[in-house]
Amino acid sequence: MGAPRFRILSLEFLERDVRLRMPFRFGIVTLTESPQAFVRARIRLSNGVEAEGAAAELLAPKWFDKDPALSNQDNVEQLRASLRSARDDYLAGGEDTAWGHFLAHRRSGLVASYGPAEVDRAVLDALCRALGVSFYEAVRRNAVGATDFEGMAMPEFLAGLAPAARIAARHTVGLVDPIARADLASPVGDGLPETLQDVVAAYGQRYFKLKVAGDLEADLERLAAIASVLDRIDGPYWSSLDGNEQYEDMDGVVELWRRMKADPRLARMVDGILFIEQPVKRQHALAKPVRGIDKPVIIDESDDSLEAFPRARALGYAGVSSKTCKGLYKSLVNRARCALWGPQYLMSGEDLTIQPGLALQQDLALVSLLGLTHVERNGHHYVNGMSGLPRGEQEAFLAAHPDLYEESHGAVRVRLRDGMLDIASLGCPGYASAAMPHWSSMRRMA
């Protein structure tokens, strides 16, 4: 398959509100609601064929920029501004391949990269629909037009990728999440799992993401409470430890890990820790080498440019996260780096409370194509499925992707069995979705 050149004719931004069924605390914010942004893109290929595509992502506060002087609304407006700036650049960019558009408009900084990341996904969806191919075909057959990068033969690397039909969901244990049923002070009472104990019983998950807050003694006690639930699982379980930039320097992380290894209550948990994610504040994370920890330490918030992962590697970091809000092409490049550098380097799949529909499906397709066997998924736990969406939209996504969704508790929601998500239906024409949202139910972005 050749790599078509195309012009971006229009980019439209819309929003709808997402309300969480239970609060989700990560880092310095406790999230209870957030707007979700949608991008609609229309392109015209050199041969005159036109097509439309779309993408979606939360406008999440206090992750892209954690400055406490900024309000949540300030953070949301930062991301809107990033989208508007990207629209101006892409519409003025002329004709190019999908990869060419990405290289021409990539930015440094998490906020600055947000707009291009969402536009790139919507544009690629349109390209897939124009060609009548799936996201997997478009990438593997290099319809995106990838060229060699840093000496890596990207077309050959992409051709060797192989998506799977299933992927394990890694459950997030947020900083204010109740662990056991005895901890449930204010029940939601909607019949869905509310505690970690409920989650294990209902979904059968074996992968978990455990957040720590930078308070050594409090973190150890909370991890012990989590272990008291997870250790009841029949068989092995695995976890990632998410520092969420709560530590000033690596010394504090080394001490946490030392204390965890010395605590008999955490013996089984420690054995199953896969990696430690971004424990040090981004201002200091790439200032000193990683030492004294016998588990891989990876970057997430510090992954703010295409150059960040090589810088982190030089300091002893062993991996990097994939998030669609940071850019799908960045994920592909970083995965190629891991393959080149050797098996000691890893890529993880992380969430940003991704919602069912376009956002969820496009991210799942990406991490599956990257060869990841598990991915953090938390949107289905903190939000009540598609309950706030038009009934027709819910039914359309359920009909198009019956392996991924089910109807229960009055709404269409993610179908999770034995800790696994079935995603074979994402190999449809377009970027992982055979259904589209109801645009008329949204408001135009201010």
Image: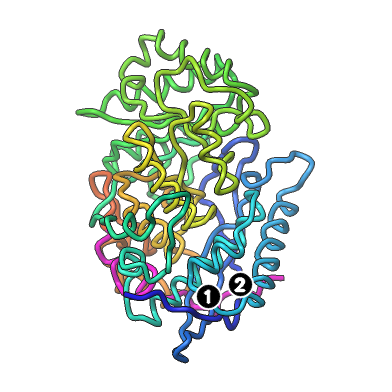
Instruction: Judge whether residue 328 can be spotted in this image.
Output: yes
Label the magenta part by its dominant secondary structure: loop
The structure residue drawn at horizontal position 73% and vertical position 54%, both measured from the top left corner, is 73
* Callout 1 amino acid: Asp
Task: Work out whether 174 lies above or below 190.
Answer: above
Find the distance from the CA under tag 2 to the CA under tag 1.
25 Å
**Residue at the limit of the structure toward the front, as seen here:** 151
Going from N to C along the chain, the mark reached first, 2 or 1, is 2
If the image is split into quadrants, where does the C terminus sit? bottom right
234 with respect to 380 (left or right)? left
- Report the disc number at residue 194: none
Q: Is residue 398 magenta?
A: no
Measured from the top left, where is residue 217 in percent x and y? 55, 14
The structure residue drawn at horizontal position 51% and vertical position 49%, both measured from the top left corner, is 352
Name the quadrant containing residue 193.
top left
Name the quadrant containing residue 94.
bottom right
Q: Nearer the viewer, residue 351 or 311?
A: 311
* Label 1, residues with CA under 10 Å away: few <14, some 14-19, many ≥20: many
Part of the protein shown in magenta: 423-446
Q: Nearer the viewer, residue 124 or 76?
A: 124
Name the quadrant containing residue 427.
bottom left
Name the residue carrying label 2.
14
* Callout 2 amino acid: Leu
Name the residue carrying label 1.
96
**SS of the residue under disc 2:** strand
**SS of the residue under disc 1:** loop
